[in-house]
Amino acid sequence: MTDICDRGTGLVTQNLFKEEKLNQKEFIQKSDEILNNMGTEELRDCLHNIARKTHESKREEFFQMLYDSLRQNVQKESDKKLQYKKTIPDDVVNDRLTSFKEVFAKIEDGELAVSARGYEDYSNGYFVSDWTWEYEDNVGIGRTIENAVKFAYDCVNDCRYEEALSVFELIMDTQIFADDEDGGDFFELSLEEMVEEELAEVNLKVLALNVLYSEYQLQPPDKRASELYSYFVYPYFNDIHIEDIFPIGREELKDTDVFLQSWIDFLMQQNGETAARLLREGIMYHKGVDGLAEIARQGYREHPSVYLAALSEYEKVHDYEKMKEIGKEALERLDRDLKICGEVALKIAQASSCVNDREFMKKCWYEAFYSNSTIPNYLRLFVDKEVTEEYKDLAEKRVEKLSISDNHNFQYLSETAKNSISKKEYQCLKFFSGQFIQIKNWCVEQKNPLGWSGSFIELGMDLMLLRLYVGNHLRIACKEIAARVANRIGFSESKNLVFMKDNSVFEVEVVAQKGGEIFWDVFCLWRVNYAIAAEDVKLHVEWLESVIDKRIDGIVGGKYRNKYGDVALLAAALGEVRESLDLKAGKRIVINRYLEKYPRHTAFRSALKGYAD
């Protein structure tokens, strides 16, 4: 290595190992750079050391690599087209291929099937059951699949890509029948299900990479992108990265730069999250971070996530000025109603903070809520007095215009999802807009003290208890209520929570407990903007007390023991609220009242006493 440095390459041995993780392309380029500066003896020493460190399981592969390289050099000298030596006789390949086709035809026709028996599984509790199947493969279908996979790999290694793909198609597309021994019916199992049920031992990722590699070798350049992409309908291709196919096989893939450009061009025309992921990865691999920004300008309507990917890459190298520049451009071009604009806005806010542009940072906070109207994004507007004064009214007006959708969570999986919220999120935003009478009316719609699960009243009661609490330091029950609310409104799952509290610029994952604490800090800043008249406070507390009283009567009187802890928490929180409003010993009074009312309900009394302090 010292000789390399002396030749003026600028490479320092110790720095090679401090590089950021290289992708396959960068690794090859770096390796070629070093190899081109090595002499014959140095190359021999290098290969000798590789051989010395080669694991026993890889030695045959290493010998094959040496023989292939030797053969390649001989053929180059004779100007012959490079051909790798076949290791499996043609007649053996044809016989095995015919045999596998015959067996898989029987599997497809149901002549060969696995047996299945179903039963109710109560392992998660007596009242919770799941239908479970147990399988037996008495005819060896799993073994057939494993042998076929091994043969297909042998074909790939033998550069017989057409034969390999024929076998792969049999393995991937043949539906396996399962015979229900009790019901007498048949149902189908896919390859993935066979693997999940441990009926066949196959590494699906390795299989997928070999399929893509073989298809690449067979297809002409103008069809490679579309043919390779067609395989991503299979679930086990979901996590495949296109660069992972380049090290597969004996033959190095040719024209990869041409392919990658055609791959990017093709994906630009496709919709969906799979295409978006592959596009972002392909651009980053082929063109780097500047390429992400370049392609984002071309395809932002179909793939706005490329802008977000570019911002994330610039963030890794702390280029905040570039983040701000690209981010501003993204916000100007992208549809403001796209949820993803909210993420873009938060990235720009972080970058703006880093370059001391607090004014633009605050504007981005509002843009984050406008585009992605989550409760955390709304509450962020109340952590800074200037932001609150400028954007509070605008945010409240935005709430009134939001689209309410029952399947907004599913839509959010798409990079082109429009901003929408669930009905419960809308109700929460109305609460945080100060519409407390409306919150009470929604809660009143729940007439029965039982059956609260999934209804707004569960969350509405918690929110009102917190709003009526006076003081910044929560006691045990209300602290638990605050943590529960933070969890129910998705606050604890959000990033940027520390950013909301301490103006930290880095996204962080926050544990639920810390999220609850930050939520309460922000809640205290929020509530000063929405005062409640003293006479209304009294009415709200009386209403809460009557609802909680009926709830406790329904739960404890009906002996719903699994809910005792929940209603004990409500009682204790109500007591803490009353005490915070200057009712001396208010918590003890409330708890003692229920202890006297239910002298024989040991479990409920124990839950109540747990909140005494």
Image (tube, rainbow, N blue to C red):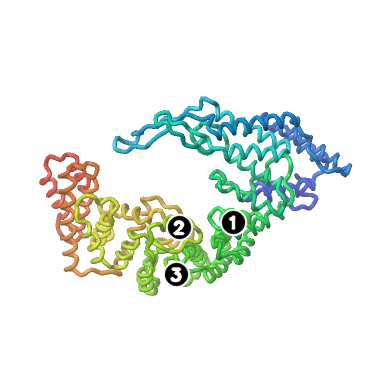
Q: Which of 474 and 423 is in front in this view?
A: 423
Left or right: residue 406 compared with residue 357: left
Q: In which quarter of the image is the N terminus?
A: top right
Mark found first going from the N terminus, 3 or 1 = 1
Mark closer to the chain start, 2 or 1: 1
Q: In which quarter of the image is residue 91?
A: top right
In the drawing, what numbered circle is on residue 227? none
Residue to which mark 3 is pinned: 362
Residue 14 in sight in this render: no
Examine the rendered structure and indicate whether residue 116 appears above or below residue 307: above
Amino acid found under the numbered disc labelled 2: Tyr
Depth order, front residue of 440/389 = 440
Q: Which numbered mark, 2 or 1, is in the foreground of this view?
A: 2
Distance from the alpha carbon under mark 2 to that under mark 3: 25 Å
Q: How far apart are marks 2 and 1 (CA)?
A: 18 Å
Residue at figure coordinates x 46%, y 36% from the top left:
187
Q: Where is residue 359 in the image (x, y as percent from the top left)?
A: 47, 72
Amino acid at pointer 3: Lys
Residue labelled with disc 1: 280
According to the picture, the residue beneath numbered tag 2 turns out to be 412
| Residues under numbered marks 3 and 1 in contact, where contact means CB atoms less than 8 Å apart | no
